[in-house]
Amino acid sequence: MNTESSSPAFSPDWLHIDAMDLDAQGIARRPDGKVVFIDGALPGELVSATVTRRKNQWEAATLTAVHRESSQRVAPRCPHFGLHQGACGGCKMQHLEASAQVAVKQRTLEDNLWHLGKVRPEVILRAIEGPAWGYRYRARLSVRYVQKKNEVLIGFHERKSRYVADMRECHVLPPHVSALLLPLRALIMGLEARETCPQIELAAGDEVTALVLRHLEPLSDGDRQQLRDFGARHGIQWWLQPKGPDTVHRLEEGGPPLAYALPEFGIAMPFKPTDFTQVNPHINRVLVTRALRLLGAQRHERVIDWFCGLGNFTLPIATQAGQVLGVEGSAALVARARQNCEQNQASAPAHQALAATEFAARNLFDMTAAQLVADGTADRWLVDPPREGAFALVKALAAIHQARIGAEDAEPLPPGAEGWQPPRRIVYVSCNPATLARDAGLLVHQAGYRCSAAGVVNMFPHTAHVESMAVFDLAN
């Protein structure tokens, strides 16, 4: 790719980049209106590109030259980032200045809310930002023994490929983990099982760095000893996964537990390396603090935390509310959340005891209005769903509202709904702006809420992943 510093006479073949999409591709339009998605191009740039795929309404292309460069273009920090053959696919936006990445994500959130949900937030929240490098405490690294080269590769997949990138460093991983990439390659190369170990999963806590080795065949005593020796030299806690996630276990017991803290609330969260926790612990602390400030729970109020997981929000809420219910689809996570709650309750000072907190395992993708009523009235909700969103939950809430206002084709109120009241405020934490927008449209247009605020959370710098938060208040 060429980058031209001067601005030569305009050519009709050049493309002007108007925006950037969720895959971090520049978006341009040809004179006939056809949309062109260009890898490597940034908004505001004038570029040349080579088309790699043609459809009736759009084309995909790769950047070949920049004739007018964006002021936000920066030199990528990582040598494995780029459009070249074998480039790592773990990051997509290292060529865009960090604050500009956040602006693109904010625009994406607002565009999704309007175009998909017909919702405009009354207030745009200031973006939550944190360290741009060394933030990724959770990662799934592929492992491949390349027989032709007689070497082991460990890392993310290559850009738009199933092959494993030849990574020798990674600047989004914590520095001590990046420094382990080459030693890990040497370790796996020396194992008898090097051809049957397809994956290493990273899960770092505040004090412990855990690595989960997926192995398709039983490990020999010699391989186990090599893992022990490596762990002792590099301060690694090894876990083994012979089959599915439920088979994950410690190579050796003892030592400190894998855990992270939420110090502002006096909460400690032990977890297993296969449990869902946020990738970026620095942002997670700020995220929880802002979510609870926006939630505004009081000591006389009941709060429900939907999709509660390990209790990342539930337990901090229990330091402020009077009664808390955490609901999660995974029975294993609910058991872990109960255990975490009991441990934190036991260690809390008497004057800072947690509120009465219960947990329930339930499939929230099959939520009904009747189940919503059965769970009881809550003053406030916190909703933190996976990428699929919380459609069934929001739909159940909307169904009750539609029945109460006598809407045409509304379903009848479920038994016991006469005294049930909707939450006055909902704080919705999202990892997918499209499903947030869909659910926001239901809340605003069918459930009687207004979107009082929304903003992005830059949980994954240098990627196109958009995390966000929105606040919904009862309109009346």
Image (cartoon, grey):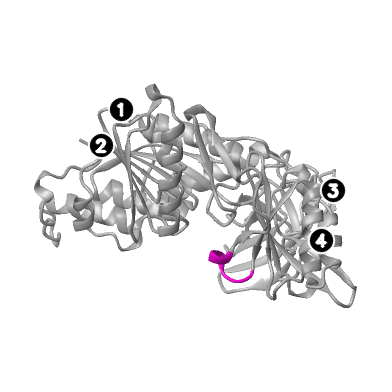
Q: Which residue is mark 1?
A: 298
Residue depicted at x 24% and y 59%: 368
Compared to residue 283, the image places residue 247 above or below, namely: below
Task: Tell me the SS state at disc 3.
Answer: loop
The quarter in which the C terminus is drawn is: top left
Specify few, some or many for label 1: CA neighbours under 10 Å numbering under 14, 14-19, or 20 or more.
Answer: some
Residue depicted at x 67% and y 51%: 210
Residue farthest toward the top in the current orientation of the protein: 351
Q: Nearer the viewer, mark 1 or mark 4?
A: 4
For the residues labelled 3 and 2, the Cα–Cα distance comes to 58 Å
Task: Tell me the SS state at disc 4.
Answer: helix
Residue 115 can be seen, yes or no: no
The residue stretch that appears in magenta:
242-247
For badge 4, the amino acid type reads Gln
For the residues labelled 3 and 1, the Cα–Cα distance comes to 59 Å
The quarter in which the N terminus is drawn is: bottom right
Q: Earlier in the sequence, mark 2 or mark 1?
A: 1
Indicate whether residue 95 is drawn in magenta. no
Q: Earlier in the sequence, mark 4 or mark 3?
A: 3
Residue 5 is drawn in which quadrant?
Answer: top right
